[in-house]
Amino acid sequence: MSEGNMRLTLKVWRQSNSNTEGGFENYQLEGISPDMSFLEMFDVLNEQLVEAKQEPVAFDHDCREGICGMCSMHINGQPHGPLQGVTTCQLHMRSFKDGDTIVVEPWRAGSFPVIKDLVVARDAFDRIMAAGGFVSVNTGNAQDANNLPIPKEAADDAFAAAACIGCGACVAACKNASAMLFVSAKISQLALLPQGQAERKIRAEKMVAQMDSEGFGACTNTGACSAECPKGITFDNIARMNREYLGAKLSSTNV
Ligand code: FES
């Protein structure tokens, strides 16, 4: 990790667990390289805290390559910080200036309770996926691709929806803490492909029911979710989810 000469003030949310109140702590950092990632900068902070025999800041991370969706910091009021299409792990300190004060908070949503410091529980997303975000047909061996024709546009849209990494930035960005962008991406990637047709109707109903029972808010079409999504999941997925849900409801109630 290269040495640098940036000096920063960090205001970091510290909270012992979901049952205690949290608050901001100020930290001074020196020698930060513009080439460090935001998480590497936090590694430096934690080394400093451990050396001073203080509790390091808990934060989520895994791949540090923008793939896994684990990193989740709310930086200066924006999920994943100031750049578009970038996760916190791929944000670099060159996006900030020497002398900056940076405010770092956890995702703020009732359905994502704080576990500790910057780590929130996102298992509500796992339960939504378990409710219907899968294909349960026995697919056997991989077929020759030409045996299963898929229109190019549908394949492209399914692929784009499948780029969702489930980080929860959409929920954190939404004033209603709505999870509709996430759920709609997961429904879309299966509804658009032949493999997803067998459970298409019950999938939308079950996933939406689970989303509602988890306490996520409604969508009021502000589009903040899509604007802040690090993977560029588009708003039209929500329209597709609404169509899927309505179609499922109409056919299940024989209206
Ligand atoms: S740590 Fe995996 S996406 Fe950021």
Image: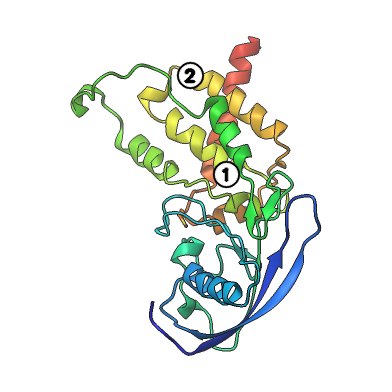
Q: Is residue 43 left or right of residue 218?
A: left
Q: Name the kind of residue labelled 2 in the image.
A: Glu
Q: Residues within 10 Å of mark 2 (few under 14, many from 20)?
A: some
Q: Is residue 150 left or right of residue 164?
A: left
Q: Name the kind of residue labelled 1 in the image.
A: Leu
Question: Which residue is pictured at 26% across the width and 24% down the height?
Answer: 148
Residue 158 placed where, x, y %?
40, 38
> What residue is disc 1 on?
181
Question: Which residue is pictured at 54% across the width and 70% down the height?
Answer: 42
SS label for mark 2: loop
Front position in the image: 189 or 37: 37
Front position in the image: 205 or 67: 67
Q: Is residue 58 above or below residue 138?
A: below
> What residue is disc 2 on?
199
Location of the N terminus by quadrant is: bottom left
Residue 236 placed where, x, y %?
52, 43
Q: Residues within 10 Å of mark 1 (few under 14, many from 20)?
A: many
Location of the C terminus by quadrant is: top right
- From this viewpoint, is residue 238 visible? no
Q: Farthest residue toward the top?
A: 254
Front position in the image: 242 or 1: 1
Residue 136 placed where, x, y %?
43, 19
Question: Which residue is pictured at 64% across the width and 59% down the height?
Answer: 118
Determine which quarter of the picture holds residue 16.
bottom right
